[in-house]
Image (spheres, rainbow, N blue to C red):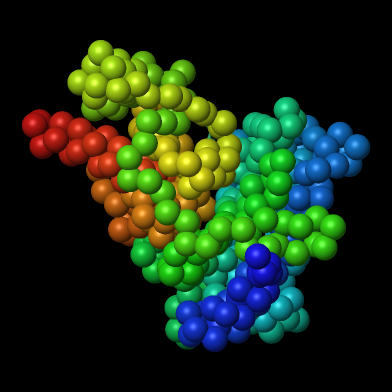
Amino acid sequence: MKSISLIQFLIEERRAGRINAELSLLIEVVARACKRIAVATNKGALGGVLGEAGTGNIQGEAQKKLDVISNEILLEANAWGGQLAACASEEMEDPQPIPDMYPKGNHLLLFDPLDGSSNIDVNISVGTIFSILRCPDGVTEPKAEHFLQPGTTQLGAGYVVYGPATVLVLTFGHGTHEFTLDREVGSFILSRRDIRIPEETGEFAINMSNQRHWEAPMQRYIGELLAGKDGPRGRDFNMRWVASMVADVHRIITRGGVFFYPLDAKIKSKGGKLRLMYEANPMAMIIEQAGGAATTGRERIMGIQPSGLHQRVPVFLGSKKEVEVATHYHVEADAAV
Ligand SMILES: O=P(O)(O)OC[C@H]1O[C@](O)(COP(=O)(O)O)[C@@H](O)[C@@H]1O
Ligand SMILES: [Mg+2]
Ligand SMILES: [Mg+2]
């Protein structure tokens, strides 16, 4: 089979009129930054990159050294190229404009520089998630409000998993595609075009330790899956939870499955655990483009009008049928009160 590099793929997408030169450059720059993060991640203890940074982020969470390093790599790589107006990151309170000394472009980039931080020190897969928006016309100094666009307006989204292989998954709204890093050559090579998630699945991902804090419809739904063959679903389900969203989502786009981070009593006041702009929206676009579904349990994630850069939401995503059943239970329970 003839191998197609990411750069060749981007040229094809440009020729097909699906992306412009600026967006193509933006992906090249993000992919290059992610290769650097992969190198840092691979060094582990030998690179002095494990452990806490001794700082906290805007979310009030302790930062790992690799959270800080990955954020800096992405910011530095994106500063100079002329493809961006500003970046926003899970790790920074406010958006960072492109410095005046560099040319500015028409795009806004949002990222979770290192997803699954709790897994770094134990050598389990982590990743980077990103989302691309258009900078509103006439805005030269983008502020947080200019990033508050619903997920349906994303021009592209992607993630990179730093696992046994480094893998980039990408969409521009015309299917979801996967690229695997050839470490010797240093290029991402197309490994799956137009990924399709099976509509039905027998595998779910959820942090079961929160079970007693969930809302009643979630208790009902998971209770039915756990009841297996003897319960109302009439079949057994298997469970997996990596606790790196990138790795859990990658399993789903590889063999199907469904992922939940529902609302629970502990996180209710925050609105959820996962972040709309850096995690939920880009993953929702990738999943929908692969034929899956993504909701909060009550509404389509990409339809939400964001109210804050660091807003959190419940996340249900993956194989369509299971997302629909779990969402239906929530909508039905709400309607009954
Ligand atoms: O530790 P928990 O509650 O199982 O949560 C795991 C979830 O939190 C996250 O690690 C949050 O992401 P960050 O590591 O970027 O903060 C997700 O990747 C994962 O799905
Ligand atoms: Mg994350
Ligand atoms: Mg993170």
Q: Quadrant of residue 220?
A: top left
At x 73%, y 28%, the residue is 122
Q: Quadrant of residue 87?
A: bottom right
At x 54%, y 78%, the residue is 13
Give the answer, above or below, for where 204 lies relative to 56. above
At x 74%, y 32%, the residue is 123
Q: Where does residue 98 sit, x and y in percent of width and height?
A: 66, 73
Please tell me how many numbered marks the rendered image carries: 0
Q: Quadrant of residue 175?
A: bottom left
Give the answer, above or below, for where 273 lies relative to 175. above
* Observer able to see residue 96: no
Q: In terms of depth relative to the viewer, which is nearer, 237 or 38? A: 237
Q: In terms of depth relative to the viewer, which is nearer, 37 or 165? A: 165
* Observer able to see residue 44: yes
Give the answer, above or below, for where 75 lies relative to 25. above
Q: Where does residue 270 sit, x and y in percent of width and height?
A: 41, 37
Quadrant of the frame with the C terminus: top left
Q: In terms of depth relative to the viewer, which is nearer, 85 or 175? A: 175
At x 46%, y 18%, the residue is 209
- Return the residue found at the far right: 46
Q: Where does residue 323 sit, x and y in percent of width and height?
A: 31, 41
